[in-house]
Amino acid sequence: MNATTTPDSTGHFGQFGGMFVPETLMTPLQDLAAAYEQAKADPEFKRELDDLLKNYVGRPTPLYFAERWTEKLGGAKIYLKREDLLHTGAHKINNAIGQILLAKRLGKTRIIAETGAGQHGVATATVCARFGMECVIYMGQVDMERQALNVARMRLMGAEVRSVTAGQATLKEAVSEAMRDWVASVENTHYIIGSALGSHPFPMIVRDFHRVIGIEAREQILEREGKLPNMLVACVGGGSNAIGLFHPFLDDENVRMVGVEAGGDGIIPERHAARFQGGKLGVLQGTKTWLLANDDGQIELTHSVSAGLDYAAIGPEHAFLQEAGRVEYTYATDDEALEGFKDLATTEGIIPALETAHAMAYVLKIAGSLPKSDIIIVNVSGRGDKDMEQAMKYLFKDGNPLE
């Protein structure tokens, strides 16, 4: 597989991707694609982006050897790519910084975004404050309740957070409302999509702004170990943190890659968000991809303890990589993710986001069965501060941890 050949000129990753949007948005999307190509070739754009990533966002992030966790699990060496140490507490800021620079080039003065776990909303509010732009964030009412801390952070930075009460009142509905806003306000508004989803060119743009994760991890592991890792692991909702880690390694055939979806209460209809477990090919919110739908084609309800993975579709490049057999996709249930959340915290003193904890759950399962000479890099896509209230409902009783 040549990682540089996708997407094609029409935004397709094989049969996935494309541009399935109202006619009103076709020209703005084409303008965005053209502006992005010009920006990539502009040394001044790269200079400004690199400066912000270093001095505002906090890159490069460390690649940390989890010595105690490795010893406890008794198998492969585990390295953690510490995206949780970035400004705002998650990888989302990489993309938000890049896209607001594109919005400036396009002369936009207003920014909208959707958010589930709230980390992309916080990142968007952050860059809007930094660049003095109007900011509106759409967020499902259910997610606002379980991510109240992030709602407060967004509002503190001057963003308007609009509650979405339709349907399941989670991420899918927030995306729909943001797209309706964009159709009506596209002349002065840029939509900073938060994951590797949606119509072309967004999956490509979001991936490219997150490739810095894998580029750094590759350099760091070669410096530390003198060889490439045997395995990469990342959680997958829409798939931005995972594709950011995976993409720079796609041409390395001996590097195994595993994306971990949200298994919720188990693979029961409407009680999980694992698209490759009983999902089907379809079109949702601008892109053709693998999604959860019933026999009539209606999008199914989803569930996850983590708001950021609670979405019915997966990014089109992930669908392509799964079909090609290049990346493996599995799932972790809510209970398994909570165990990963607790285990990393008690063993390494690092509290991961509940999204990230799904990746930790897979490492808990697999690391001990691998040779001690093997190396795993797992992406710590975000920190768990935002999830403490939610996690305590499951992990604590009368103030004490549950065994």
Image (cartoon, rainbow, N blue to C red):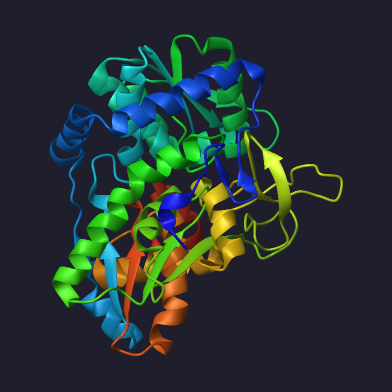
Residue 263 quadrant:
bottom right
Res. 161 visible in picture: no
Q: Is residue 159 above or below residue 322?
A: above
* Image side of residue 61 versus residue 4, left or right: left
Q: Position of residue 387 (x, y in %)?
A: 41, 49
Q: Residue at x 58, y 20 (%)?
A: 25
| Of 256 and 59, the residue lying toward us | 256
Q: Position of residue 367 (x, y in %)?
A: 39, 81
Q: Residue at x 21, y 34 (%)?
A: 46
Q: Position of residue 175 (x, y in %)?
A: 57, 31
Q: Is residue 172 above or below residue 343?
A: above
| Of 76 and 201, the residue lying toward us | 201
Residue situated furthest right in the rendering:
296
Q: Position of residue 256 (x, y in %)?
A: 43, 73
* Image side of residue 280 versus residue 229, left or right: right
Q: Residue at x 37, y 23 (%)?
A: 155
Quadrant of the frame with the C terminus: bottom left
Res. 46 visible in picture: yes
Q: Is residue 135 above or below residue 292?
A: above
